[in-house]
Image (cartoon, helix red, strand yellow):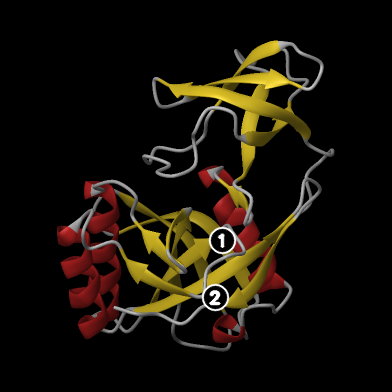
Amino acid sequence: MDFQQSLLSGTLHRRYQRFLAEIELTSGELITAHCPNTGSMKGLVAAGTKVYISKSNNPKRKLSYTLELIDIGTSLVGIHTGRANGIVKEAIAKEKVSELLGYEIIRQEVPYGKNSRIDLLLENPAAQQHCYVEVKNVTLREENNALFPDAVTVRGAKHLDELAKMCTKNCRSVMFYLVQREDCDYFSPANHIDPVYGEKLQFAIVQGVEVIAYSCQLTPQAIYINKPLPIRL
């Protein structure tokens, strides 16, 4: 996924009220940017950290700037959860995800389950089985391990339940963890942060849900899926 224009760089002063970040641009201007991440962003938001932001020319937006990447030294980290679906969709369409080949149609935000929407619905007219793909953006790292979630997520647990139910309806269900950083060797559920989510993931796997994790290659110009990561439960 290419950014529409190269990102601007700056220095993070603080993240506050969850969705706001105070950033000093290289010009010295202090701006408020939208922070599109509902998680804790543990380990990423120390004052003085170098960040990259995008700027919108849409006059209807309250905030022109959006926080996109954080430079933690060992890697850039993509914190914009809203970009995860597009990154995965593009990778599947370009046949970069070996586990999800052979699907001609990719639809986004399709209603399913109980008041839910699946991130990606993969279809092949010649096949009888649809593939439901739920995408989660992963930013937390401990040692060399990518972890999800970084905060308790009731919504995330509900998504696992919905995926498990689809397995009983002759559908393929996939939990896709998009690790938007380059410094992780494998993926695990963060059981010490949200043990309920970890239990739900184990149950979903028993029901037939497949678990996939991929790391990303990130620059201020683009984000691409890089390589699959082993799963450690």
Residue 227 shows in the view? yes
Image location of residue 142, percent across then percent down: 40, 61
The kind of residue tagged 2 is: Glu
Q: Nearer the viewer, residue 166 or 56?
A: 56
Image location of residue 2, percent across then percent down: 79, 51
Precedes in sequence: disc 2 or disc 1: 1
Please report contact status of discs 2 and 1: CB closer than 8 Å, yes or no: yes
Q: Which numbered disc covers residue 107?
A: 1
Q: Residue at x 54, y 44 (%)?
A: 79
Q: Residue at x 74, y 24 (%)?
A: 56
Q: In the image, is residue 133 above or below residue 72?
A: below
Q: Residue at x 51, y 34 (%)?
A: 36
Which quadrant does the C terminus fall into?
Answer: bottom left
Q: CA distance from mark 2 to mark 1?
A: 8 Å
Q: Quadrant of residue 65?
A: top right
The kind of residue tagged 1 is: Arg
Left or right, 182 with respect to 108, comes to: right
Image location of residue 222, percent across then percent down: 77, 52
Q: Which residue is mark 2?
A: 123
Residue 172 shows in the view? no
- SS label for mark 2: strand
Q: Nearer the viewer, residue 229 or 178?
A: 229
Q: In the image, is residue 26 above or below residue 108?
A: above
